[in-house]
Amino acid sequence: MSEKYDAIVIGGGHNGLVNGAYLAKAGLKTVVLEKRHLVGGAAITEELKPGFKFTTFSYALSLLRPDIIQELELVKHGLMVLPMPNNFTPAENGDYLFLGADSQQNYHEIARHSAKDAEAYKDYWHDIKQVVQAVKPLVDSIPPDITSSAPEELARLAAVGSHLGRQNPKVLHMLTRLLTGSAADLLDDYFETDVIKAAFCSSGLIGTKVGPRSQGSGLVLLFHKLGYFDGSIGDWGFHKGGNGGFTQAVARAAQSFGCEIRLNAGVSEVITKNGEAIGVALQNGNELYGDTIISALDPRRTFLQLVEPRDLPTDLVETIEKFKFQGVSSKVNFALDGLPEYPTLPGRTDIFRGFMNIGPTVDYIERAFDDAKYGWFSKRPYIDCAIQSTIDPDMSPPGKHIMSCFVQYTPYKLKGGDWDTERENLGDTVQTTLTEFFPNFSDLVLHREVVTPLDIERTVGLSEGNIFAGEFMGPQMYFFRPAPGWNQYRTPIKGYYQCGSGTHPGGCVMGAPGKLAATQILGDLKK
C-alpha cells in the first residue's frame, strides 16, 4: 500500500505540526506522521489520575514566536495562554523572594533584602532586554552557511556582521559575556543577595548540563529570555489545558489548511533512490511516497537512524556522532489534596500562581550540579515547580491541585546504577526536598509520576532525554546546529530536510525551527 504526497513530515511534535501547517498553507499536499496515539511530542497533557491533568513533560510557554500565532491563526483554533505572574523562591532560613507582575512591588520586595539590589534590578533587566532585541532578528531568520562561498551566503554573513556592528558596544559586550561566560559571574556584577542571584540564575540551568558557575550557563540564560508574554520580554504563561492544549490548537490549524495528521504511524526509515528521498517506510510495513521528506526528530535520529549513514558525507556523520545530548532533566508530577503552606507565609496562596524555584542560593544549585558531574542525581535537587491548577482550575478536581516539578540534575547515564531501579528513589528525593521547604507537602500527595531522562527518550524519542534535542552550547548553536554546512534545514540527501529542535534556533516550545524549515523548503521548491 502506498500513497503520494507533496510533503511528508516525520514526527508530530510542535515543530513538526508547525512545519506541516506552513507547507499545507502554501498549497502542498502534506501529511504529518506521529508514532504515538496523540500529537504534541513533549508538549502534551495527560490525565494520569481521574480528574487530574498533567503536563507530563513541557509545562509552560514563552518562546513561541508571535508571527507563528498570527500566520497560523492559532487564536482562532483555540490558543489561550494564561498569565503566570508570580515567582517564589524560598530561602533556607524561612525568608523568601516573591516577585510578581507589578514592577514597583518587585522593587520594594528586592529592597527588603538589599536597596542596592533593588536599583540593580532595573539595570539588569534594561541590559537583558537590549541584548534580546539585538539577537531577535538572528533568532528569527535562517542563519548563514559559513562553509559556503556562494555570493548569497557571503551576503547573508555580511548582513549578520552589519547588524551586530550597528549595536551599542555595551550591548555587544553584554552579549559576548552571555554567550561565553557563566550566569553566576554575570549576576555577581549586579546583585549581592544570595536568594536574588539564585532566583535569576535558574534560567541559565534549564535542560542543560551546566551549573550556575559553568561557562555556557550565560547562553542558556539568554535563550530563556528570548520569549514574550503579552508583549513583555522574558515573561511566561500557561496554556489553557496545559501544553497539550497548545499542540492541539496547532494541529487544528494545520488541519484547517488541509494538512493530514496520522497517529500511531511511526516511521522506520526514509526511502531513498539515487541520492534522493522519495518516501518513508512505516513501522507497520506500509510505505508512503512524497517529493519532500522532513524529519522533526533530533539530529541523531534524523541522520543516523532514519537514513543510512553511509549515504552521508563522512564529516557530517562524525559531527552528528559527537553531537552532545547529555540529558540531565526529569519531571516529577504530583496530584495534591490541597495547597502546600510555607511556614512564614501561612495561608498565602498567591505565591503559587506562577513558578516556585527550589534553589535558595547559587551554592545550593552548584552543589546539585556537582552530584551530576560525577554520575548521580542530585541529593538536594534544583526544582522548578508550578502548581498549574492555580492558573487553570480545570486541571484538577475542585479543591485539589496538580503540581509540575522540573528537576535537575538527573544525568541520563547513572554511574553504577540505572533509571529503572532508581526512578522512585528520585521521586522520594524530590518529595523530601519539597517537604523541607513546605512541611505539609508529603501529607498532601495523592499521586506521583516520575519521568526520568530514560523515560523521556523511550516515550517521545528525544535522544538521551535531552529536552532541547541537543545541548545548548556554543559549538552546537547557530552556524553549527546541528553541523557546519547543514544548519539551514537541508541535508545532503536531495528532498530530505530537518525541522526539529536540533536545528536553529533550538529547543523549547517556540516553533521557529518548524517555520524556518518550511521557509527554506518553499524557497527551494521555487528554484
Image (cartoon, grey):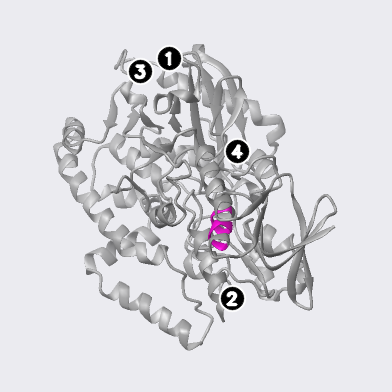
Question: Principal SS element in the magenta part?
Answer: helix
Please tell me which of labels 1 and 3 falls first in the chain.
3
**Label 3, residues with CA under 10 Å away: few <14, some 14-19, many ≥20:** many
Frontmost of labels 3 and 2 is 2
Residue carrying label 1:
439
Quote the CA–CA distance across marks 2 and 1. Answer: 61 Å
Please tell me which of labels 4 and 1 falls first in the chain.
4
Disc 3 is placed on an element classified as loop
Residue 486: x and y, percent? Answer: 58, 72
Residue 241: x and y, percent? Answer: 49, 32
Please tell me which of labels 3 and 4 falls first in the chain.
3
Residue carrying label 4:
376
Please tell me which of labels 3 and 2 falls first in the chain.
3
Q: Which residues are magenta?
A: 17-23
**Label 4, residues with CA under 10 Å away: few <14, some 14-19, many ≥20:** many
Identify whether 470 is placed above or below 98.
below
Say which amino acid is labelled 1: Pro
